[in-house]
Amino acid sequence: MQELSYLEIPTPDTDAVRHWLQSAYTPQVGQKIPTATGCRLQFPNHTSELAIVVWSLQRTTYLKVFRWGTVPVRREKSLVQALQQQLRANFPYRYPQPPPVDLEKESIFSALAKDYPLTVQYFQHFPNGEYDLTRAYWWEQRWRDGVRSPQQPRPVVFSQAVSGGDPSYDLVYLGGALGVIHAAVMARLGYRVLLIERLPFGRMNREWNISRSEFANLIDLGLFTPTEFESLIACEYEDGFHKFFDVNNPPQCQAPVLHTPTVLNIAIDSERLLRLCGEKLRQAGGEIWDQTEFQRVDVTDTAACVQVVHLPSGRENVVTGRLLVDAMGTASPIAWQLNGGRSFESVCPTVGAVISGLDRSVWDPQYGDVLNSHGDISRGRQLIWELFPGKGDELTFYLFHYHQVHPDNPGSLLEMYEDFLRSCRSIVAVTWTN
């Protein structure tokens, strides 16, 4: 037996591909015989035949052509090439987009049930699931609109020739996640520090993983004591495994599992970390203004004058600093303006969950899968998993891929949710954390 062709057909409808093979497909030569997995091609007076097999993985259809026999059949190469061309013509790359939704006429669940059945099924059982799915839908729509029809960013950074008085702060930070770690260090060094955070300070909706050697830098800086670091650890596991799918590679090209016992093997209680950094920032004389949104900054030769609004009260304020630190991430309006309307060319769409109550025979909490894929390219994407033990009996896992932003294919979190839930629905049962 020899493999002649291996194709990804970008459709979850494997039955449609199988039906096309068995009914509409007309080979150049040979007699077609339907099979349970595709079809066979037999050739008169020839000992070899071809088998065409289709199967499904990760909501994608795959097809292989095998030759049963040692002698090539007549016009074998051109036959396989013609099959590939017909498959591409009948099953072209299409990038699904969410359907239009009118929430005055139907719920988000009924509107998305046909296109994302598992996503709807699970979100219906989550606390605030309807709100969260609606938010995910509109976030994706705004993202698609922004990619396909980029708008000139709203100016938020301005230059002013006139200098003001002495700035109130040395450093003003925008963004209270990773920003608070740096801000706390600088406050302890004696700088006047203000941290501005749009959300209630200290909230974090995802897990953080780190190694002891990485965190040791913060201990050496004096921000944390070794005892405080130990108190932040939710889980520390023995080893991490790295493995990319290579079953279809020749044996000599298949890589062994890479063991990384000291890489990302410590799960940090991220909210406790942020709260502790906030306490240290305040103890060193720094300030935190949370639920406060950045509006604009006017930059002079001696200061940055920052306009903000306190969201609960609507009260506006102006604060000055010798240096403004933008820690708002890629969605920062400052980054968007300074980079001509887009602060990135590629993104990493990610969905994930935290589950508890998992059978220990399914998952050993002493080990983590740091980077893994369990299949070949799926609809043009290499889907990658990360799995980390968390506090107690919790397991945190993510599904993501690296994606180049393009108007024809903006990317889709809703598609990712559907892929994620289909792949892991056998073990997702007890607790979910968005």
Image: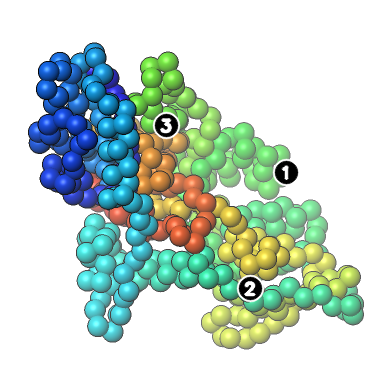
Secondary structure under the numbered disc 2 in the rendered image: loop
Write down the residue under mark 3: 244
Whichever of callouts 3 and 2 sits on the residue coming sooner in the sequence is 2
Q: The disc labelled 2 sits on which kind of residue? A: Pro
Tell me if mark 1 has few (under 14), some (14-19) or many (20+) residues whose alpha carbon lies within 10 angstroms of its own.
few
Write down the residue under mark 1: 221
Residue 340 percent coordinates (x, y): 67, 66
- Splitting the image into 4 quarters, where does residue 366 fall? top left
Secondary structure under the numbered disc 3 in the rendered image: loop
- Using the image as rendered, state which of residue 361 and residue 163 is in the foreground: 163
Secondary structure under the numbered disc 1 in the rendered image: loop
The tag on residue 153 is: 2
Whichever of callouts 2 and 1 sits on the residue coming sooner in the sequence is 2
Tell me if mark 3 has few (under 14), some (14-19) or many (20+) residues whose alpha carbon lies within 10 angstroms of its own.
many
**Horizontal placement of 408 versus 81: left or right?**
right
Whichever of callouts 1 and 3 sits on the residue coming sooner in the sequence is 1
